[in-house]
Structures are given as structure tokens and as C-alpha cells.
Image: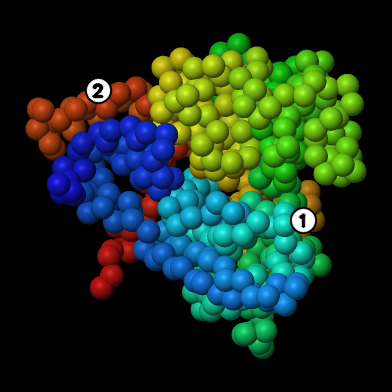
Amino acid sequence: MKPTPWQQRWAIPPTPSDDADLFEIARYQFVSAAQYIPDLREGMLEFLSHCVRTVTVEFPVEMDDDTVEMFVGYRVLHSRVRGPGKGGIRYHPEVNEAEVRALAAWMTWKCAIVDVPFGGAKGGVVCNPKELSQSVLRRITRRYISELGDLIGPHTDIPAPDLYTDEQTMAWIYDTYDMLHPGRNNLPVVTGKPVDIGGSYGRREATGRGCVFVLERALAHGVLPDRDTIRGATVAIQGFGNVGSVAATLLAARDARVVAVSDSRGGIYNEEGLDPEAVLEHKRRTGSVAEFPGAKTITNAELLELPCDILIPAAFEKQITGANAERVQARLIVEAANGPLTPLADKVLHDRGIPVLPDILANAGGVTVSYFEWVQNIENEQWPEEEVNAKLRIKMERATDAVLRSYKDLDANLEQINTARRQYAGDDVEPVPKPDIRTAAYVVAITRVAHVAMERGIWP
Ligand code: GLU
């Protein structure tokens, strides 16, 4: 029997298995964190655990050999409580509805944590960009965007890049929308555009850079008792795309030792440290980090289990699970990807005392500079890169401070929280355990979103 909202309100949900779909995982994270906020109204928990709109479009595209293929795309709006929907669009063969719904919900929490005036949304098209020509990708993009019609807009839902979409994709999205809505400033309809079409300086690097700012701040706060700076730390990074490669370069510039990186073709390891610029050059030449001279070849799975101070999964979801979390040797994990750890992995790492800086904080730099781009577009301005980076640092540090303060407060007030739970729900209610940092991040986000929802009231 489906639990009533009331039962869900006070029951600590069972940990989903590693096969659970991504939306079940996102919902589990939300509902379990909500248990730490006794004052949250039942209806609010029910309201915020749903996506307000899930749209599927199926559309034909003419391929290069004149055949016609059908493609499936999604656009999900999770919440517009704090502002228009915001979130990227991914092109990947494994895109599915549950995944896009989870990613949309994570955008809501992410935007609340960095305090930008957006709700959460996400999109995706099931396709394999590695096997498609630029002209097919352009036709897919234009048709997908025109099928979405007025579901997106500069003040309703604003797309951005995600896995395997880039500035070029965003330029096509802008152009398509602008052709359909001539005569007004349409630049703020999409972020992550090329800098000569209203893109922001620093947007491309923003997710990786934001991740490094969060890491530096968290170390300064003492997440690792015996290390307060990045200098000298050993780091392994899974994924060497837009996020992983930028994080690697910035970390090396701060005298960290980047011992391993990887991409979809495998990983490379050198205990002495890799030069990320040289690896990037090798990847530009050969298409992959694999076979970088002087490094040992490792698999993506091996990378996650290397001895190092900091592990940064910057590729896909569900990389660290109940099956390998026990073998992780890193002392701190920074989630640069969305959803790289499953709830079972979270549990194991929490029990082992390995802190995790969660995705909704650690990778929020991308959407933060997307917000800056949106503001610049509305004002028809372009800020210098130093200004963008300085503003990004402030946002990421404030967000990290808020999350780590929440973490301390929850820990210190656990008894009070459990007393309040018993007062509301009776003596049989299960007490909440010691929180992890993800829970603390959710508590910050849920509190902020719920507060605005209460102020606005539920329409009508
Ligand atoms: N796709 C990115 C993310 O997952 C960026 C979203 C945006 O800039 O709107 O955070």
C-alpha cells in the first residue's frame, strides 16, 4: 500500500538498492533529509518530492544519408518556487525519464544552496553524439527545441549545457528560439553560449572552478582534521571532460599532486603526479587521456580505489556504489558529477568516516555562472572574467559555509530534533541518526525552498 503523506512525513525511508532508478534515489535523499526538519509541513514534503512537469517529445530527423530517424527527448521542470526553471540538456544514449527527473530535482536544491533565483529543470535527448555528425546534431537540437516550443523561455525555463552538449549546442538553441520569437532580447533563454553570442567569460570553466573553491573552503573549515589546504594533497579525478580537466588544472596550479585521471576509454596513473596541461594536449591530439607517456594504464573502476587524499568523480552517476565503496581509499570525496554516489555508497562511506562534499554543493559553480550570464544578458552587459571568477568564489564560499554550518548545527541539535519528532509523531517515531554532509546540504536547500513556498502560498 502506498504510504499516506503523513506516514511518509515521519518515516525514515529504507535505503534504495543500487539498481533503483535515479529519481527514486533523488527522492530518497530528499525525504530522508526532510526528517531533520521537524517543522516542515507534511504538504510541503509531498509538494517538493514531485516534479511539476515532465514532457516527452518524439521527433523525426533527417540523417546524412537521407533516411529519417525518430528521436526521444525530455524536458522536466521540478520546481519554479524560487524562480524560473534552470538546468542543462544532455545528449547521451542512456538518457531516460527517471534520470532527467532526478537531475531536475537536484537543480532545484543546487540553485537554492548557491542562492540564485532559479528553480530546477533538466532536459535530455536519447542519442549518441559520438556517432553523429555536426549537421545531424544541429537538426536534432533545432527540432527538439522547436518541439518544446514555449515550455522554455527567458523567464520560464532556461536550458544550459550538460553531458555531451556544449557552446555550439547552446548557440543552436538560442538561434532556434530567436527565429521563433523575433524582435526581442532572447539571449537569456539559454546559458553556456559562446562568448560572442552573449556567453559569459568563465562559464565553461565554472563547474570545475566552483568545485575547487568548495574544496578549498571545506578544507579550511576542517573537513579533514590534518589537512587545511590543497597544497601537497594527492588527487584522483574520474572524467577529464569540461569539469574534470578544469579541476585538474586548477588543483595542479595550487600545488596538489594529480595522480590519476580518466575518460571513457580508461585511466592513467602516476604516483609522482601528472601535468594536466600535458594530458590535455595529449587528449586533444589522440582523443583520449589513455596511453599518456610515462603513466600507468588503469581502468575507471581502479581509479576510484586508488590511495589518495581526494577523489573527484567528475563523470557519470552511480560510480561509487555498495559494491565498491568499501574499497575506496580516498580520505575525502568531492562530487563534481551529478549523482556519482549511490545511497548505499553514502552509508558505507559515512560509517567509515570518509566525508563527501555532495554534488548539489560541489558542482553548483556551473549554474552559478549561468545565473551571471543570464543577468549579463538581461542587462546587455559582458563582465570581465576576473569579475565573474571573483563573484563565483563568493557564492561558492557562502554556500559551503552554509552547508557546513548546517552540518555542525544538525549534529549539535540531534537530541532536540529527535525530541521534536516525538512531539509531532509520537514516541514510536524512529530517531534520525548522525547526519552526513549531503543531508546538511539538503536541509539548507529544503529550508530555503520551503520558506519561499510558504511566503508565496500554493496557488490559487
Ligand atoms: N548542467 C549543469 C548542472 O548540472 C549546469 C546547469 C546550468 O548551468 O543551468 O549543474
Q: Which mark is residue 222?
A: none
Q: Is disc 1 placed on a helix, strand or loop?
A: loop
Q: Amino acid at mark 1?
A: Tyr
Quadrant of the image occupied by residue 381: bottom right
Left or right of 237 on screen, residue 1: left
**Cβ(mark 2) to ligand 1 < 8 Å?**
no
Left or right of 52 on screen, residue 5: left
Please report the residue visible at 46 percent of the width from the left and 62 percent of the height from the top.
76
Residue 214: % across, % down? 61, 34
Earlier sequence position, callout 2 versus callout 1: 1
Left or right of 394 on screen, residue 413: left
Residue 175: % across, % down? 70, 76
* Residue tagged 1: 201
* Residue tagged 2: 415
Please report the residue visible at 51 percent of the width from the left and 72 percent of the height from the top.
58
Please report the residue visible at 65 percent of the width from the left and 63 percent of the height from the top.
191
Q: Amino acid at mark 2?
A: Glu
Residue 140: % across, % down? 65, 70
State whether residue 278 appears in this view.
Answer: yes
Q: CA distance from mark 2 to mark 1?
A: 47 Å
